[in-house]
Amino acid sequence: MEALKSQGEIEAAVCDAVAKFQQEYMGRGPRHVHTHLIENKLFVHLEGVLTAAEQRLMDAHGRGAELLKQLRSHLVVAGKALLDTLVRDATGSQPVSVHHDFSPTTGEEVLVFTLSAAPQCRGRSDFHDRRRR
């Protein structure tokens, strides 16, 4: 039986999984990925995701930002099965939904996953018991 991961280990595994998805599916890995797990919600913030081609589109086309936002949203929807698998493998919980937003201006992207259950973590029950008191 595999030992329970800490919340930090789960968050780090999600960062690695989402960075891998970005690199392999979107064509470029992010400069930075930050993940926060709160109960059964997983918040992923990516910085530096624009590819060179996307940056050129932003610079050269008046509707570049709008087009990029649509393109990235469609790519997340198209890659949802792979993304769900990567997140499930990292957390041990099945994603129920994913919400996505992208800022072409800053090159930031946000993914919010709702998981079927809060992942089992080392020390989690102690933390939640203290919060309830």
Image (cartoon, grey):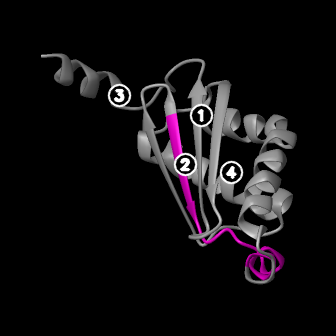
Q: Quadrant of the N terminus?
A: top right
Indicate the amino acid at tag 2.
Val
Assess disc 2: are there few (<14), some (14-19) or many (≥20) residues with their C-alpha within 10 Å of its C-alpha: many
Indicate the amino acid at tag 3.
Arg
Give the residue displayed 40% in from the left and 32% down from the top: 122
Q: Which residue is mark 1?
A: 113
Indicate the amino acid at tag 1.
Phe
Q: Which residue is mark 4?
A: 17
CA distance separating discs 4 and 2: 11 Å
Give the residue displayed 54% in from the left and 18% down from the top: 117
Q: Are marks 1 and 2 in contact (CB under 8 Å)?
A: yes
Q: Quadrant of the C terminus?
A: top left
Q: Specify which label sits upstream in the sequence, 2 or 3.
A: 2
Q: Which residues are magenta?
A: 42-58
Element type at mark 2 = strand
Q: Specify which label sits upstream in the sequence, 3 or 1.
A: 1
Residue 2 x %, y %: 59, 31
Indicate the amino acid at tag 4.
Ala
Q: Specify which label sits upstream in the sequence, 3 or 4.
A: 4
CA distance separating discs 1 and 4: 13 Å
Residue 54 shown left or right of residue 124 in the figure: right
Q: Which residue is mark 2?
A: 44
Residue 44 x %, y %: 54, 48
Q: Are marks 4 and 2 in contact (CB under 8 Å)?
A: no
Q: Are marks 1 and 4 in contact (CB under 8 Å)?
A: no
